[in-house]
Image (cartoon, rainbow, N blue to C red):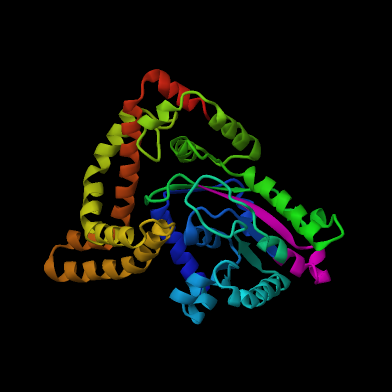
Amino acid sequence: MYHFIRFYVRLALRFYCSRIRVNNTDLLKSKGPLILASNHPNSFLDAIILASLFCEPVHFLALGELTDKFLFHRIMEVFNIIPVYRLKDKTENQHLNDKSFSICVDVLLKNGIVLIFPEGISENKWQLGPVKKITARIVLAAMNHESLHSRLSVLPVGLNYNSFDKPGNTVLIQFNKPILIKEILTGNTEAEKMYSLNVLLRERLNDMMLQTEKLPAMVQFLISNSPPLDSDQIKNLQYKLSEERNHTIFSKLKKPGYLISPSQTLPGSLILILLLAIPAITGWALHALLYYPLKFIIGRKTSGSVYYDSALFTSLFLAYPVYWICCNIIGFFVFKNTWAHIIFLCMPVFAFVTIYSANRIQRIRNYLVLSPAERILLTDYF
């Protein structure tokens, strides 16, 4: 069941996230025992994306207050979800964390992969929050087993989204060097070992993230148009983020700031949009009845929270097969034309063309609002 769902998630993500770029795809073939330690900017979508990309099954920690409320135990088993509880939420549930940490260690002993979000909470922002002790606690629990001493590693993962509220977004997944257990064995006390790991983990997560508090439009532009980056390239872009110049350019761009790439031309992009106009409009018409009501409902239900992107993806993920089947059944009986039947069967293809065309139109729009000098300035970032 897990492998079937992962295949379907991978397929769905090709539509919802038009670009998922990984700086080191070889690491996606990693085997355990391995702890993935990732920043947490986009709620459940973070775990969904990472778990879908790895070849081996990924177990991940999720907030127990949410899983207890919305998920059945059997569903949690299928998706490899391990609940964890925050001290400030329910102190009476803290003893359950010992059980959760024990499950994590069991997974590692079986050469599995565990995904942890060291920040503990999710926030839609382009900044790394405080690194909590949860990763270190699980590592220290695993260190009680001698068989894990030389094999267990912690792989820092930087997740960089160009948007938290739009399908068709770009995600940069930046892996840093794994942290080996022997790197944190300095210090005699448990507190010193936990501190050592947290400092090292925070450093390596910072090196894989584009971060800002005051310039979200600039970060969105950089993520939208960047290839996978190494740590030196990220540091270079991070330095440019700190410079106090040319920031007004980014306010002209429609978010998340896609631009026509240097390898493309404006005439070529316009011709491509014209060629795709009819299938793109067809895709929009076929899916409007599903997408816009769901978008409205999810927007109302998740207002003021970090769950919009995750909830919208999950809703489309669950509803689309039913919607596609219903459209094909209705289309079969209403339309007696073979081409109409083919169009309904190919609805996913039309949906992809619609999303792709919307992306291209934004690139053209952003190109036209900039002066030639501004275009040159922005291309210099890469």
**Residue 300 placement, left or right of 248:** left
Is residue 351 visible in the rendered image? The answer is: yes
Tally the marks.
0
Please state which of residues 82 and 107 is positioned toward the viewer in this rendering.
Answer: 82
Vertical placement of residue 74 versus 176, above or below? below
Is residue 4 visible in the rendered image? The answer is: no
**Residue 22 placement, left or right of 165:** right
Vertical placement of residue 182 versus 222, above or below? below
Q: Residue at x 40, y 64 (%)?
A: 314
Q: Position of residue 157 (x, y in %)?
A: 61, 52
**Residue 317 placement, left or right of 21:** left
The quadrant holding residue 64 is bottom right
Q: Residue at x 37, y 50 (%)?
A: 166
Please state which of residues 329 and 180 is positioned toward the viewer in this rendering.
Answer: 180
User: Is 117 covered by the magenta stretch?
Assistant: no
Q: Position of residue 301 (x, y in %)?
A: 33, 63
- Outermost right residue: 188
Q: Position of residue 192 (x, y in %)?
A: 80, 57
Q: Position of residue 336 (x, y in %)?
A: 12, 66
Report the magenta residues as a range.
138-160
Q: Residue at x 51, y 81 (%)?
A: 73
- Outermost top residue: 373
User: Is 157 covered by the magenta stretch?
Assistant: yes
Please state which of residues 155 and 68 is positioned toward the viewer in this rendering.
Answer: 68
Q: Residue at x 47, y 70 (%)?
A: 5
Vertical placement of residue 298 versus 203, above or below? below
The quadrant holding residue 305 is bottom left
Please state which of residues 263 and 315 is positioned toward the viewer in this rendering.
Answer: 315
